[in-house]
Image (cartoon, helix red, strand yellow):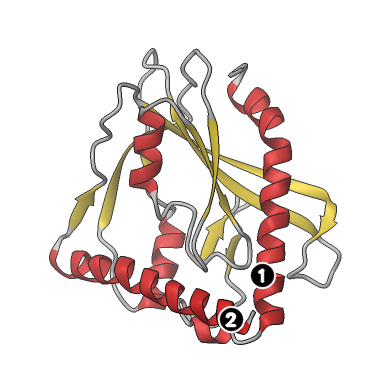
Amino acid sequence: MRFATEAIMKSLKSIAAMFLLPLWFAARDVPAVSAPTPTGLSKVGARLVQFTDFRRDDPYLSNGSKRKLMVRFWYPRSIANGCIPAEYASARVMAFVSWRMGISFPQITTNSCMNAPLASGKFPITVFTHAYKGTFTDYTFLFEELASRGYIVASVAHTYETSAVEFPDVALIKSVFDGYMDTDKLLKTQRTLAAALSVRSADLQFVADELFRLIDVEFGDAS
């Protein structure tokens, strides 16, 4: 197990470097950037959904509060209505992450329309979990590509581990772990690693159990 933990730590650091260095150069040299244009046939919609697991206390809190999550969806959208361009992330999240990383992020334009109606038809669903202390929009370019090809993508923000996530009640919840990419502090013990993975697993199981209800309530009949 010790060797597996060390391998995971090294992998996380490599992934962090791979993604953060391009962002650093982009922030220095490019005032605004756009996500790659999806190559599929469908236009893309996006939507934010908050829900609560009333069966589970939040393991990061000691006051008995139930576990709350934000999920962002990307999906094939109907083209019957107009388009409200979807933000890459909220201004407060972008400002906080920029501050923690010590850089100014560029303005990022997406290819998604916020709260657009779901296209008619049957679509497979995939659930995504972000990297350690990442955000649920980190792979927007991939999610938009999948949605353009007929998939519904549900990306889960793991509250109190994700760098920052904004809830509809205007609460900005930040990571409880020090350092934006300080893997040593989080992964220094097997117990801590196991606890973090356990929370993620429970989050994903809950989202998977709720998906069909969420799709029916939020989007209408997508079956």
Give the residue at x 72% y 80%: 191
Identity, as a three-letter code, of the amino acid under mark 2: Leu
Q: Quadrant of residue 210?
A: top right
Residue 87 visible here: no
Q: Which residue is mark 2?
A: 186
Give the residue at x 68% y 43%: 207
Task: Give the crowd class for mark 2: few <14, some 14-19, many >=20 residues within 10 Å.
Answer: some
Q: Position of residue 92 (x, y in %)?
A: 45, 60
* Front-lying residue, 201 or 180: 201
* Residue 197 in the figure: left or right of residue 21: right
* Residue 185 in the figure: left or right of residue 14: right
* Front-lying residue, 172 or 70: 70
Residue 209 visible here: yes
Q: Label 1's element?
A: helix
* Front-lying residue, 115 or 56: 56
In which quadrant of the rendered image does the N terminus lie? Answer: bottom right
Identity, as a three-letter code, of the amino acid under mark 1: Ala
Q: Position of residue 56 (x, y in %)?
A: 83, 55
Of the residues under marks 2 and 1, which one precedes in the sequence?
2
Q: Which residue is mark 1?
A: 196
Q: Position of residue 152 (x, y in %)?
A: 50, 31
Give the residue at x 61% y 59%: 158
Q: Are marks 2 and 1 in contact (CB under 8 Å)?
A: yes
Task: Give the crowd class for mark 1: few <14, some 14-19, many >=20 residues within 10 Å.
Answer: some
**Does residue 178 lie above or below 119 as drawn?**
below
**Does residue 125 lie above or below 71 as drawn?**
above
Q: Position of residue 187 (x, y in %)?
A: 58, 81
Q: Quadrant of residue 223?
A: top right
Q: Label 2's element?
A: helix
* Front-lying residue, 37 or 4: 4
**Does residue 28 lie above or below 127 as drawn?**
below
